[in-house]
Amino acid sequence: RTCTHPKMGSLSSDAPVHAVLFPFMSKGHTIPILHLARLLLRRSLAAAVTVFTTPSNLPFVSRHLAGTPASAVSLPFPGGISGLPSGVESTDALPSMSLFPAFASATALLQPSLEAELQRLHPQPTFMVSDGFLWWTLESASKFGIPRLVFYGISNYAMVVSRAVAVENHLRGPMAEDEPFALNAFPWIKVTKNDFERHFSQPSTEDTPLLEFVMKTVVTMGKSNGLVVNSFKELEPAFLEYWNSECVPRAWCIGPLFPLERPVAHDPHVRTTWAEWLDRKQAGGERVLYAAFGSQAEMPAAQLREIAIGLERSGASFLWVVKSRESEIVADVDGGFKDRFEDRVRGRGMVVREWVDQRDILMHESVHGFLSHCGWNSVLESMCAGVPILAWPMMAEQPLNARMVAEEIGVGLRVEAADGTVRGFVSREGLAKAVNELMEGDRGEAVRKKVKEVAAMARKAAEEGGSSWTALETLVEEISGKR
Ligand code: UDP
Ligand code: UDP
């Protein structure tokens, strides 16, 4: 096992632990880090926690830290960055994900203000946990002798499969886009080129900035003092073991990084319309499909309309969360009938157009399936709530998450595109069929049974004495020089 703690324990072992956390500015990367902040304080693993963010993300961060002694510090994002609309300080506020590379590089402009704040912080920071995308934070941490842990909001499975594909050089191989190939490192796993973004399988000169960015995140990760993974060992033991024997830095599974309890009983006066709607479904003994595609993925209008008609055709009860930019398209769907889609499904289906508490929905007794884009947080939240997944990956490492869900762990089924490819158009018939199979079919029952077992495993890992509980304690003690 490669042990890489070059600079651990630079502080005296009785100094109070001050954890400095710097999440990447997107919901999927920020939410688990905010939970880590609360966890460190609640378990007295840290005496102080400081979370860095940018001004427009400060309200979201502060709201999630309310009631804890953690402080949120915002670093001003320089204005007038070429190629970026001003005031956009998170990837989920970008008008298009094509601006991701520009946004990701612009974060490096925060480096001087981060270092000014680090200089000022009391007590002296003991360690930093920063997002892999904020690769330049390694240099800042090093300047102040602070060990840096990297947070990558993805599974061990996705980490090692991506690495194996790169090391074994498959993406430049002769296979067609949708031709499955096996990995030497994991012969039972088959993937296709289409499971990876085109900028990796068919890079063009325009992709150079993004590929350079990815390279920087990989190189700085390797030089960091550890890797914090929002997963738990029992979910993917072979992949965690593989990472820790073949790769650096050492990975620590400390998840799930969210509370496993249902949010405390709601004040009936602030109960949301969707929560009341789910309560009614529960009372009527109906099984609800929850459909949501995360905060980033961009769905073409034609596909959105097809989803609406597919959900209608399935006959299932559904709660569908749409993003603000999708709202009008969905409102206009008529599918060739006189009435609009939402009028036709009223009572049976509900379209929600606001930010919801996704975990609360997944933990509602009425919810029996999740049509998901397979962002890692969504996958983990669904598994922990014991809800089987209907996997419909869109971007980033989501196709790998979908394979993990359906082929490796067996907690979900896949939506199939009409042309059989990973990224193809999904027809209304295809969607309706997949929904029915998950909600009522035999394969649906099999994955529902399996996901309940996984949920129980997650609970065990997170509770006192469990693998994730112990890993976090050991990690903090090692990195603070107390062990
Ligand atoms: N989320 C939420 N309410 C919403 C939309 C998303 O709470 O209306 C949360 C969701 O529970 C998850 C995160 O936002 O924790 C999204 O992360 P994920 O990795 O699933 O997808 P991404 O948005 O990064 O594509
Ligand atoms: N990634 C990728 N293609 C991209 C952007 C990211 O393959 O266009 C990789 C990235 O290197 C990281 C993983 O996918 O290892 C997760 O990406 P991201 O966090 O952007 O996805 P999200 O969870 O926010 O949807």
Image (cartoon, rainbow, N blue to C red):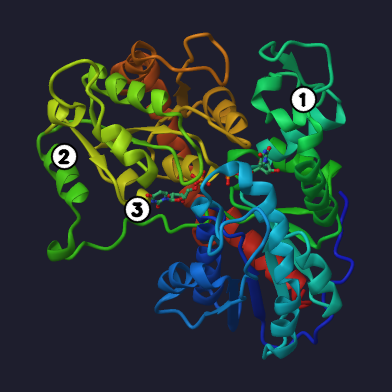
Nearer the observer: mark 2 or 1; the answer is: 1
Q: Residue at coordinates 36% horizontally, 49% vertically from top-left?
A: 358
* Residue type of the residue flagged with mark 2: Gln
The C terminus, quarter of image: bottom right
Badge 1 density bin: few <14, some 14–19, many ≥20, Cα 10 Å: few
Q: Quadrant of residue 68?
A: bottom left
Badge 2 density bin: few <14, some 14–19, many ≥20, Cα 10 Å: some
Q: Quadrant of residue 300?
A: top left
Q: Answer with left or right where residue 412 lies relative to residue 474.
A: left
Under 8 Å from ligand 1: the CB of mark 3? yes
Q: Earlier in the sequence, mark 3 or mark 2?
A: 2
Residue linked to disc 1: 202
Residue 159 location (% of width, % of height): 71, 40
Report the number of discs.
3
Tell me the number on the disc at residue 306. Answer: none
Q: Residue at coordinates 68% horizontally, 66% vertically from top-left?
A: 129
Q: Answer with left or right where residue 105 lies relative to residue 262.
A: right
Residue linked to disc 3: 355
Asked if one can make out residue 414 in the rendered structure from this viewpoint, the answer is: yes
CA distance for labels 1 and 3: 35 Å
